[in-house]
Every structure is written in structure tokens, then in C-alpha cells.
Amino acid sequence: MPAGDLWMAYRMRWKRRRFLFRIWRKRRQITPVQDRTVLIKPDMILCFVTLRNEMARLPHFLQHYRKLGISHFLIVDNGSDDGTAAYLAAQKDVSLWSTQHSYRLARFGMDWLGWLQWQHGHRHWCLTVDADELLTFPYADSRDLGDLTRHLDARGIMSFGAIMLDMYPKGPIAEVRHDPTKDPLDALAWFDAANYREKIHPVYQNLWIQGGVRDRVFFTARPERAPTLSKVPLVRWHWRHVYVSSTHQMLPRRLNHVFDRADDRRVTGVLLHTKFLPDIMSKSQEELTRRQHFENSSLYADYHQQLAQGPDLWCLQSQRYTGWAQLAALGLMSQGDWDQDDAI
Amino acid sequence: MTLGIVMLVHTAFDRAEQMIRHWADAGCPVVVHVDRHVAQETHDAFVTAVADLADVSFSRRYRGEWGMWGLIAASQAASRQLLDRYPQIQHVYLASGACLPLRPVNELKTYLAARPDTDFIESVTTGDVQWTVGGLDRERFTLRFPFSWKRQRRLFDGYVRLQRLLRVRRRIPPGITPHLGSQWWCLTRQTLTAILNDPRRAAFDTYFRQVWIPDECYYQTLARLHTRRLESRSLTLAKFDFQGKPHIFYDDHAELLARSGCFVARKIWPQADALFHRFPSGSQADLEPHTGTIDRIFAQAVDRRTSGRRGLYMQSRFPFMERENGFTAAPYTVLQGFDAIIPDLTSWVTAQTGVVAHGHLFATDKAHFAGGAAVYRGGLSDNAHLRDYNPKMFLTNLVWNGRDRHQCFQFGPADNQAIKWMLARDAHASVWVVTGGWAVSLFCSGKPASAVRSEAARLQQVESRFISALQSPDARSRRHIMTLAEFLGSPVDVLQAIVDDMAGHRATALAQAPVMVNLDGFAVFLQDLKNQGMHPYLAGDFAPVGKVKSLQSQPRKAYVMGKK
């Protein structure tokens, strides 16, 4: 290994330790509301979420992930006032913490979740998602996360990559009608199929993907500021692991290597992003004053102002979502070598 | 009772128990071999679980590591036990705990009863095998392999290299011809007994002990010595990928498995509850096992994995751009300079060939998509900022999205040049350049030579850099470069060649020549530029004063059938 790489590895190691210290320092920012973590058994797949005012999505969110095989949800509620907390506290497989501290200063919730992962995630497969992200992966209709993680275990793979796919309605967002118990994808059935650009992140070595509908509509003037879409949501956790920026990047860096440079052997998934439900308008309005999202909130003022109007994101080239097989055929995700056995 | 089962088990004991019960319920005696690495308490619990079955027994335990002798020792001991205890058995089936019977055992019994003398074991000579791993085929039998490929890879590889270096060759015991095949077989009592009781068995065992992966060749070779009638195929459906690793069957493969007509399949994902629930399913009594469909489906998957989907950049695959054969998914055509001379080029090209003809995709104001669309396929935006943020990815996305049709676009020195090296190196690009085409645009702008002098110098410089990229040693695109003067010498021939190239040599003679700009006075314009101190050398040689051959085709005379 050249000296430069060694030096970088050393710096990253210290960076990771600083993050761990920061997580430890902020551990008292969250207070337990309903702690059911005694129910956690070895081999359970855990789901970690930070959220705020998500009643429009939660019923279907929990239903979706229970079906995929999540056994326990560890959720941090960041000051909801729409009944989210009470709803969650009543769920038998949810442990709930609450906080009123700044989401942005807690690295967008990663410090809070980091402390929960540190305590409860060790050796578990941990899924870290937002309440508006619905994971899908190859064969998701017939296989679950248990099958997927056993496949990854058999390969000795510790992390699973997924791209965020922004789903949007046909017609103005303002006109969407949505029932919280129903699948939001009924209303948000459309997506951009192939306007994504990839490059390798020079420091964290993850594949940095931008593009999609937000890039096409909101960030044409400043594409470098467009939201990052690549994520590493599912990880075989070790207490020493940390997320760096949302779930886009991790340390140690090898966990970011969820792609293949020669063949197509890595199975990957898609996070269907249900952000563009009508509540995005009030949330964007709130965000303009609260300024809790994105590193440099002032840059995004335009974006939130446009969103608050409930714009129409649909265009003639939009694709209608039909299922995982479509996403695999389009090359948004891959079956990789799932179906073959390494263990012989 | 004519069929006995030898079952090798090392994991997923609940499934194994289910399988044992399945065979036993159909009246087949089962001898189970449990790997010696399995913990004693697990083993004991397993034995207790099937204790109620009378015809199930356990054989001496060996350590069965993949590719090593233990698996043979295990199946020998279990077969011996089975044959000794159940003299009425006619066929012995070797199965594993991860095998799933797809059809009722009675159908298998009927099938075997109709073929009492036939051994079903895949057995082919090394010369005919395509699927061996690691480049070892003949050498499996002529080198020694005392080290484990899985645990001691470096020793394994080193020892192979050493033997090759020293040219060590083992002698294959006389009288046998090495054969390879699937390790899951179904042999007749007569053949199996002959193998186990062979007077030379000690010598054979000593030899095969150090052959690589003996379970793929021991029975396959020795069965050839004793068989009365051998069918070289396995009754167990097993698919292997290009690395020699078996495919695993999940719930979603149910239809595929049902159609195969095979009796037993492996390996089954232990959690594939629907498969275990559905199979075995009957009522296909006289169906011959065939694996054609499965072969085809898996061959496609293998193809995709070995080469990826070329020209697709995605989250699971990000090839090194420079190392790839082509950056893009499909051939496309780049035209530089032609649209200056033929203003209506895109619609003319589309009319002639049916390809998708874009305008200047890399123009500084925006990407000019075919038909003036603001968003092209896949959601590709015409915004110049977005495009210029990652121009290479813009082009690969464009070609990928439109790969079902040939695409062509205009390029020029006034455009963003960021993709010039890509156009030079991409083997899928067919680049046609008329150098000095920009001079025609400047001429048509109507401005005097003195006003456009610096712009002309800039464009010429940019174009010459593009040309040198195209002419660099590592350029791999198909390049056709001509000067403006050369093109004007025989425009129709060049256009015919372009159209043929795009249409894949299917094009017929041009139905109609395109309308070109009027170049009266162009030579004078060039001379003016020279007089201003700017030498437009890329345009080629024009007679200084003589009239440029008019490109505006002469008004056609009704009785002339065409000059060319």
C-alpha cells in the first residue's frame, strides 16, 4: 500500500473515532419513551429511524418493513406534534426515544441513531432508513431480508447498497390524495429511469450517484448541489461502525464498497422515496424557517420555496413503476450473483 | 423396495429430516452420513429426531470437506452399509440434505424399474468438459493435491506451480480412463458392488485420494469399468455458473423446476418454504427429465454476470472507463461540420435512414435533442449545466437509453469539448469530420472577414485539438476525417458513405441529395481571412480566385437522369 493510502487510512481511523466520541457525547440527547429492546433476539434484523411528523406514511411504512422481515424498530422522534409518538408507542415491535434537540446539529439524526446502533445493533443486520424510504430489492415479492442477509453472510459481505429513487405523481403534488394506510406508491407511481451520473468519491470511496427528478427540476443551475442518491442502508453492524453523512457514506470505508468494478456480481436495491406526498408543501414551508435539513440550508431555500407550491414533476419521459423486476431490467439495481452458492 | 438412498448431511438438519421422512415414507431405506465436523449434540438430536423410522440408519462419520477425499469415504461406507442391510435394493441414489424431490418417489421407482440395468451417472472424458474450475482439467489426474483449496489456497496454488515447474506427473493406474461428472448419481446394485469389491480398490483409492475433487471423478471413472449400461446424465438437477458454483433455487423458481421434469433438484435454499411445500408434485408419470429451459435461463444470467451489461453504469457496477472495450452500450454516429454546409441535415438524415438524429448535443446553450424535446428518454434533461457537470455520463446515459435505435448527433468546435477523448477512444463511436466546416458558418453569418477573424482562429484551434485527439495512438473509434475542400469535391459520395455506415450497409442509393448552402464567394472569404493574417488551413486548398464548385445543386433539368 503506498504511503499516501496508509496516511489516508490512518486519518480515516481517527475520523471514525471522533465520530464515535461525538455519538457518545450526545447520548443523553435522546430519552426513552417506550423501551422494548429486551425483545431483541440475536439474528433479528433491526430497523433504525429518525422522524418528525410522519403520520401520513407510518402505518404503511411499518407494514412494509414487517413484511420484509424487520423484527424490531428503534425510532427517534424529533419533536412530532401530529400524534406520531403516541401511534409508535402503541406498536408492539417499536422502541421509541424522543428528543427536542437540533436535527442538523446531531448530523441529521446520525448521532442519535449511532448511539442506539452502538448499544443494540452490534452483530445484527441493521437497516437505517427514513420514514419516506421504502426498500425494495431483487425478488422482494418472494424473498425477504432474512434471505438477503443470509446470502450476504454466505459471501462474507457486510454492507448492502441501494439507490434512492424519487417517486412522484402525475400532475401537481398539491392535487394528490393519499390515505396513510395505503401504499403511497399508488399515488406516487412515476420516476426518472436513467438520468443518473456516478463517480467515485475521492475520500470515502463510495460510488457517488446524483440525478433523477430533483436534479432535473430543481438543481439544473447547481448540479453539484443536487442531493446524493447512493446509500448504504443495510449493514452487518459492529459497534465501531459509523455513518458519516446520512447513510450515504460509512467508516470504515470498506463498507462503502457495495459495487463491482469489473463484473456485475453485487446484489443491490432501491429505496423508493415517497417524499413527494402533499405534506411536502407544509414541510417545506416549515423548513424555510426551521432550517434543519442539508448542510448549507440557505442554498436550498429556492428548492423549498418551489416545493411549497406543490409543483408538477411529471414529464413525457417519466416511467411508471411496476415492480422490482422493472428496476432490475432498467439497471437501477442488480440481482448480482444472488442465486449462486459460494459455499458449495 | 428397489431403491435405496445414501444421504450426505452437514447442515440444515430440519430440512434434512424432512427429506429423510419423505424418502422413508415412500418405502426407501436411507443411510445417512453426518459430517464429522457437526457437533456431537447436534448429531445426537438429529438421530433422535428420526429414531421412529425403522429403515433409517446412520453410517460412520467422516470429515467431508469440499474437494477432498472424505466425501468419497463417506459415500463408500454408507453405500456398503445400505447394500449389506437391504439385499432387495436394485438402485442406490446419492442425495444430500439440500436435495428436493420434485416428483413423487413412486414415479422415480417406476422409472428405474423400467431400466433395471442402467446406471445414471454423468461421466465424460476430460477433453469434453467445459466447466472445470481454475484451468485444471487433465492436471486433476496427473498432479497431487494434498492441500485444501478452500482453506489452504496459497499452499494449494504453490504446490501446483511447483509440480508444473518440476514436471512431476503421476501415473494413472492402468486400465482406467479418467472421467468427470456431477457428483450426484444413481447406480445399480451390480455396478456399485463391483466398485466397492473391486480387487484393485485399494490401488484406486490410493490414487484418487490425491486427485482434485475426487467426488466428481471417482465413481464417474470406475463406473465405466463395471457398468452394463450407462446413461451419462444425472437424475439430479443441478446448475453451475461460470465459476463452477452451483445455483441455488428459491421460491420463485417453482415454475421452472416443475417444468424441468427432473426427479430431484439441488441446491435448495433452506428457507424456500414454498418449494418444500409444493414439491414433490405428481401426475407427470411418463415425462422424461429435461433441463433445456433451465439451461437457457441460467445461461443468460451467466452471460450478464461475466460481461455485465456493457455501457451501463449503475450502483452495483462502475467499470473503469478507460479499460472497457467500449464506454457505451451501442454504436452511434457523430457528425462534425456537415450541418454548416447542409442546414437541414438532421431531418434529411432521419428521412434517409430512420436513425434518431440529434442536433448539437453539446452546444453551450443547451442539449439539442431530436425533435426539440426538453427531456429525452430516461429523463435526460437538456439543461447545459446538468450536462456539463458530467458530460461523459450524459453521453453514456443517452446511448444506453436509446440503444434500441441508432443515434447520431452533431458536434463542432463551438460546442463543449469535454467528451473529445471519449469520442476518440470509444469503439462504438463513428466520427465523421469535415475540417473547416466552421468557416462556412462564419461565411454564412454575412460578417466581413475582419470581424470574424479572431473567432475563426479560436474555432480552428479547438478543432485542431479535437483532430489530434482523434489521431492519437490510443484512439479506437471509427474516424473519417476530410477537409472542407475534399468534401466539396464529392459531397454525394461522402453522404452516401455516412448513410450506409449508419444504416449498417443496408441503405440504398440516396433518394435525394440534401439542399446545401450557397457558397458563391466563399473562396474570396477564405482569401480575406488569409489576408487578415489568419490561415484557415483546416479548410483545405481552395483555388484562390476560381469559383468554388457550387454546392447548391444546379437546377435540375427534367431530361438529365443524374450526373453521378
Image (tube, rainbow, N blue to C red):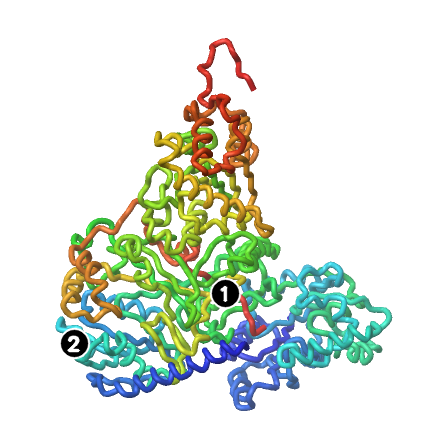
The residue shown at (47%, 80%) is A7
Where residue B547 sits: x, y (%)? 48, 21
The amino acid on which the numbered mark 2 sits, given as a three-letter code, is Gly
Residue B417 relative to residue A340: left or right: left
What residue appears at the point 50 percent right and 34 percent down from the top-left corner? B539
User: Is label 2 in contact with label 1 (beta carbons under 8 Å)?
Assistant: no
Q: Which residue is mark 2?
A: A79
Residue B283 in sight: no
Q: Position of residue B498 (x, y in %)?
A: 52, 34
Q: Position of residue B459 (x, y in %)?
A: 43, 42
> Residue B208's image quarter?
bottom right
Can residue B541 be seen here? The reply is yes
Q: Relative to B123, is A88 above or below?
A: below
Q: Under tag 1, what secondary structure?
A: loop
Q: CA distance from mark 2 to mark 1?
A: 41 Å
**Residue nearest the viewer, comparing B508 with B119:** B508
A79 and B283: which is toward the camera: A79
Query: Residue A12 at what x, y percent from top left?
Result: 42, 79
Q: Which mark is residue A65?
A: none
Category of crowding for the residue at label 1, using alpha-carbon neighbours closer than 10 angstroms: few (below 14), some (14–19), many (at least 20): some
Tell me the residue at 53%/55% (across/down).
Answer: B259
Q: Which residue is mark 1?
A: A260
